[in-house]
Image (spheres, rainbow, N blue to C red):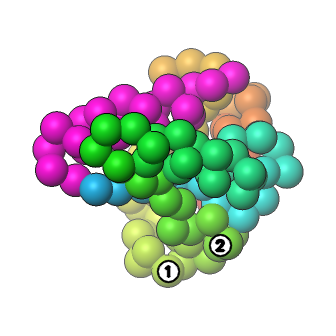
Amino acid sequence: PSRNELRATFASAWALGNGCSEVLIGTVAGDGDIHRDGTAWFLQSLDALISGQEGGIHIAAPAFAMTTEALIEASGITRDVLAGTYSCHRSSFPCGECGGCTKRDQILR
C-alpha cells in the first residue's frame, strides 16, 4: 500500500529539481481491477495533490487505456530485451509466484 504514491512523490521532487513539469507512471488498462492505484480515481487524485504543491508537477499515465500487450507491441521492445525484466511484488528478484511475476509470465508467453 502507498508504494506507488510514494514513488510518484519522490519522482515529483526530482522532477521539480531538474526542471521537469510532468512525471509519467506506468499504469496500464486492467491495473485498476487489481490495484486501487491503477484506477482513474487514483490518478486524478494524485495529479491534483502533486500539482497543487510548489512547482505544479503533473502526474500522467500515457498508457492508462492500453493493455500491457498493446503497450509492448507499440513500444517495439523485443522479447529478448523483455526476457531480462521482472515485476515482482515480494522481492528484489523474481519469486515466480506473486501477482507481478504471474502477470509477466502470462503476457510474455
For the N terminus, the image quarter is: top right
Q: Is residue 61 magenta?
A: no
Identify the residue position indicated by label 2 in the image.
Answer: 66
Q: Is residue 93 left or right of residue 42?
A: left
Q: Mark 1 highlights which residue?
A: 74
Instruction: Please report the residue visible at 49 percent of the width from the left and 21 percent of the height from the top.
Output: 92
Q: Inspect the image, locate mark 2, and give the three-letter code of the amino acid beneath it.
A: Met
| Contact flag, marks 1 and 2 (Cβ < 8 Å) | yes
From this viewpoint, is residue 96 visible?
Answer: yes
Q: Residue 32 in the image: x percent, y percent?
A: 78, 51
Q: Which residues are magenta?
A: 1-20
Residue 109 seen in this snapshot:
no
Residue 65 picture location, percent across and down: 67, 72
Q: Front-most of 42 and 66?
A: 42
Q: Nearer the viewer, mark 1 or mark 2?
A: 2
Residue 42 is left or right of residue 54, and the answer is right
Q: Mark 2 or mark 1, which is nearer the start of the sequence?
A: 2
